[in-house]
């Protein structure tokens, strides 16, 4: 193939002899069209190609591609050579470059087809070029937006995990306050009994020193010692039991270890630290659990869900004097376990109910609420425990949140 612009030129191919209508269609087609000779000379160029490529007919017609667009010459010659050798079209080839009069890079998609003489010989190659600069720009912007959205999603998930950890620490803090109250009572009683016993022992020792100890005083002291011992053993045992229970609860709340646990027992334990808060208000907390329902899962996350739901009900369901009841029920639901947390007072209107699980949605922001309680609870139930959460509510009729959990949580994603 000769590339010299001074080489002898083959006679021009006449594409539209005596067919002015076809010539008009060719020249006014909405996509760029060109016809190349087997040795890669421009035989025909339509108006659209001159517009999208910034070329002129005078500067290209009859000239070799290599002389006009050296950057694309190798690719064009390879395509034409392939068509001449195989007779097969080449379609969907993307071409990128700059127009001579512009700095911005542009893009075209091209289609190459052989043009045959009546004898079947390939005498030229037709090229159709459609500009796709805007489409490529849109694709690039979509990719950038997708990358930005994925990054935002990663940040959101990281924030969500941080919020869950913060909620765990907050729940642990509430549990510590509950521990202090639950242990303070038996320890306080024990201290009072010990102080009384110490005082009585001092009086009895003084009586012995004086040498005057009546049988009745001795019997009274023995009875006192026995009663004090019984009270001390009872209250110290109660305190020790509480410490052991809360020790396990604290471990479960602060870790994500998987184990099998009795859902009813754990529910009563997880909510026991809220008892004092309810007793100080006019809200009654009623817990009813079927025995023997075991869940192979994550007790820490389960306890966090329960605490979030009950605290959410306390914060939003009871206006004014806060009088009402929260019922927590744990029962078998076929092969699953259902946990219901229900209040009987305010309820939600349709708009609030529709947004209840949205992150940062709250009707008490002016009181410091974050709007994350229900959102985090559903995230844990669905993504961690493999269950589902159903909310039923109506204005003035209270709210019921039902959690349906499989008896074995799905494996954790590493």
Image: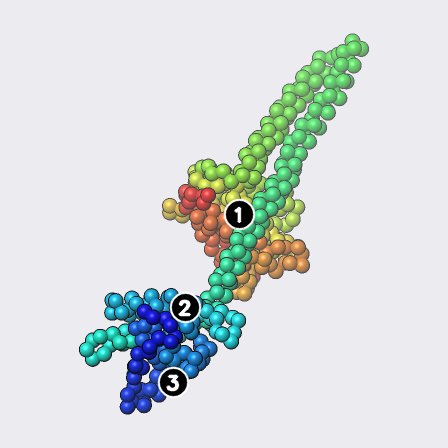
Disc 3 is placed on an element classified as helix
Identify the residue shown where x is 38% and y is 66%.
74
**Where is residue 154 drawn, in percent x and y?**
52, 53
Q: Closer to the observer: label 1 or label 3?
A: 3
Tell me if 41 is positioned left or right of 213 in this view: left
Residue on which disc 2 sits: 72
Residue 147, image x, y percentages: 50, 59
Looking at the image, do the residues carrying marks 3 and 2 touch, with CB atoms under 8 Å apart? no
The residue nearer to you, when weighing 139 against 304, is 139
Q: Is residue 184 left or right of residue 110?
A: right
The image position of residue 414, as x and y in percent, is 46, 43
Give me the C-alpha separation between circle 3 and circle 2: 25 Å
At horizontal 74% and vertical 12% (from top left) the residue drawn is: 214
Between 39 and 191, which is closer to the camera in this rendering? 39
SS at mark 1? helix
In terms of sequence position, does the residue under pointer 2 or pointer 1 come before the other?
2
Q: Is residue 213 left or right of residue 96?
A: right
Sequence-first tag of 3 and 2: 3
Mark 2 vs mark 1: give the one in front: 2
**Disc 3: which residue:** 28
Image: 243 above or below 6: above
């Amino acid at each position: 193939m000769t590339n010299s612009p001074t080489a002898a030129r083959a006679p021009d191919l006449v594409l539209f002899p005596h067919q002015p209508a076809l010539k008009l269609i060719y020249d006014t087609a909405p996509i760029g069209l060109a016809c190349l000779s087997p040795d890669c000379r421009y035989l025909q160029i339509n108006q659209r190609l001159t517009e999208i490529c910034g070329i002129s007919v005078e500067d290209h017609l009859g000239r070799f591609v290599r002389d006009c667009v050296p950057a694309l010459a190798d690719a064009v010659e390879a395509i034409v050579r392939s068509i001449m050798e195989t007779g097969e079209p080449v379609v969907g080839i993307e071409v990128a470059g700059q127009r001579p009069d512009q700095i911005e890079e542009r893009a075209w998609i091209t289609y190459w087809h052989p043009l045959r003489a009546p004898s079947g010989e390939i005498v030229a190659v037709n090229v159709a070029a459609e500009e796709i600069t805007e489409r490529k720009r849109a694709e690039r912007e979509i990719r950038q937006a997708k990358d930005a959205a994925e990054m935002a999603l990663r940040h959101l998930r990281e924030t969500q995990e941080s919020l869950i950890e913060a909620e765990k620490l907050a729940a642990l803090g509430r549990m510590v306050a509950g521990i202090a109250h639950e242990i303070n009572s038996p320890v306080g009683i024990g201290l009072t009994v010990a102080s009384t016993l110490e005082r009585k022992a001092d009086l009895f020792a003084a009586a012995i020193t004086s040498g005057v100890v009546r049988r009745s005083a001795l019997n009274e002291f023995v009875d006192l010692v026995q009663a004090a011992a019984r009270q001390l053993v009872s209250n110290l045992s109660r305190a020790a039991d509480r410490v052991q229970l809360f020790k396990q609860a604290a471990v479960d709340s602060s870790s994500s270890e998987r184990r099998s646990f009795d859902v009813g027992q754990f529910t009563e334990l997880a909510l026991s630290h809220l008892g004092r808060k309810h007793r100080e208000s006019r809200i009654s907390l009623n817990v009813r659990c079927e025995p023997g329902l075991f869940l192979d899962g994550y007790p820490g996350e389960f306890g966090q869900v329960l605490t979030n739901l009950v605290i959410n009900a306390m914060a939003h369901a009871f206006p004014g004097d806060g009088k009402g009841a929260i019922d927590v029920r744990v029962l078998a639901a076929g092969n699953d376990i259902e946990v219901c947390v229900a209040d009987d007072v305010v309820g939600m209107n349709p708009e609030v109910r529709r947004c209840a699980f949205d992150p940062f949605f709250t009707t008490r922001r002016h009181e410091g609420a974050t709007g994350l309680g229900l959102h985090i609870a559903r995230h844990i139930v669905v993504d961690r425990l493999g269950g589902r959460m159903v909310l039923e509510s109506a204005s003035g009729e209270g709210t019921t949140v039902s959690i349906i959990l499989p008896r074995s949580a799905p494996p954790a994603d590493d």
